[in-house]
Amino acid sequence: MDNIVQQLKKLGFNEYESKSYLSLVKQGPVTAYQVSKDSGIPRARIYDVLSNLVEKGIVLREEINDTTRYSPLPVEIFLQKAQSEWQSTYSEISDSLKSLENSSEKMDNRVISLKDYKTIINYCVTLIKKAEKRIVISMWDEMYEVLKKELIEASETVTIQGITLHVEDPIENLEIHRITPFTETKSTEHWFILSIDSKEMIYGPSTNERSIAFYTDDPVHIYLLEDYVWHDVLVNRLVRRSQDDLEKWITAERKAFFMEK
């Protein structure tokens, strides 16, 4: 019940209004006293709360034999009403915010931190949908699976390039990273890179481990990380084509470079 109250509060109802409506949904047409008793709302407040809900069209009031009874707007109609109002609000605020954004001065290229899982994913989804020509990615399976639907849809209109790790049957043109001691080490960070038209990029460690990522529209950052992805793709292809045992050599060279024992 508490969870439903919290969800109703997100729609703009206060706690007493939310509890009153839920009480009426459970009980059907009842008196204000019965709503107060069931919901725990003080009797001194219940009449004002119900009057507010009547004004909002969420509760219906009727007089029966000198007794005032209240009934809820049927749930299906309530949900349709809430959805319609939300969509109307979304359209209005969307137009206003975009107008403000377009009229503001262009900021210098920047790098900003994103520190919430849902925010990170929503940013990624929004950028994927903005792609016009090309998406470059480097992703482990956990992030790829979260964005798979959007990437597949985008692949119908734009080119997707890059490399994936531990992903089975990725989108065509994506390289499948070879299995190496580095990829199988538990301490290896599962970083992801998502670059859109070489104009905007999000990158960061595994969101399963840390809910942090970085957004940038700085061309230097984007160039360096896209080049990093290309080198990863290139080494993967060279190893696959070579007759020599390059993997042992690459592993040894990596350890030496990063001063690992």
Image (tube, grey):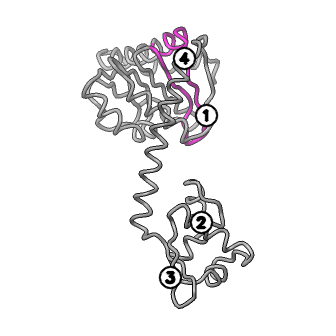
Residue 18 image label: 2
Alpha carbons under labels 1 and 3: distance apart: 49 Å
Between marks 4 and 1 in the image, the one whose residue lies nearer the viewer:
4
Looking at the rendered structure, the kind of residue marked 4 is Ser
- The part of the image, by quadrant, that contains residue 135 is top left
**Spatial separation of the CA atoms under disc 4 and disc 3:** 52 Å
Earlier residue among tags 1 and 3 = 3
Label 4–label 3 contact, CB within 8 A: no
* Residue topped by disc 1: 212
Within 10 Å of disc 3 (Cα), the crowding (few <14, some 14-19, many 20+) is some
From the viewer's perspective, is residue 34 above or below residue 143? below
Instruction: Identify the residue position indicated by label 3 in the image.
Output: 29
Amino acid, disc 3: Pro
> What secondary structure is marked by label 3?
loop
Q: Label 2 vs label 3: CA separation?
A: 16 Å
Question: In the picture, residue 119 is in which quadrant?
Answer: top right
Q: Which residues are magenta?
A: 199-226
Q: Which numbered disc, 1 or 3, marks the residue closer to the eye? A: 3
Question: Viewer-nearest of labels 1 and 2?
Answer: 2
Determine whether 116 is above or below 200 in the image.
below
What residue sits 51% from the left and 18% below the top?
102
Q: Position of residue 89 (x, y in %)?
A: 49, 43
Please name the residue shown 48% across and 33% down the image. Answer: 94
Density class for disc 2 (Cα within 10 Å; few <14, some 14-19, many ≥20) is: many
Q: CA distance from mark 1 to mark 2?
A: 34 Å
Q: Secondary structure at mark 1?
A: loop
Say the numbered circle drawn on residue 103: 4
- Residue 205 is inside the magenta segment: yes
State how far apart marks 4 and 2 are (Cα): 39 Å
Residue 159 on the magenta segment: no
The residues tagged by marks 4 and 1 sit, at their Cα atoms, a distance apart of 30 Å
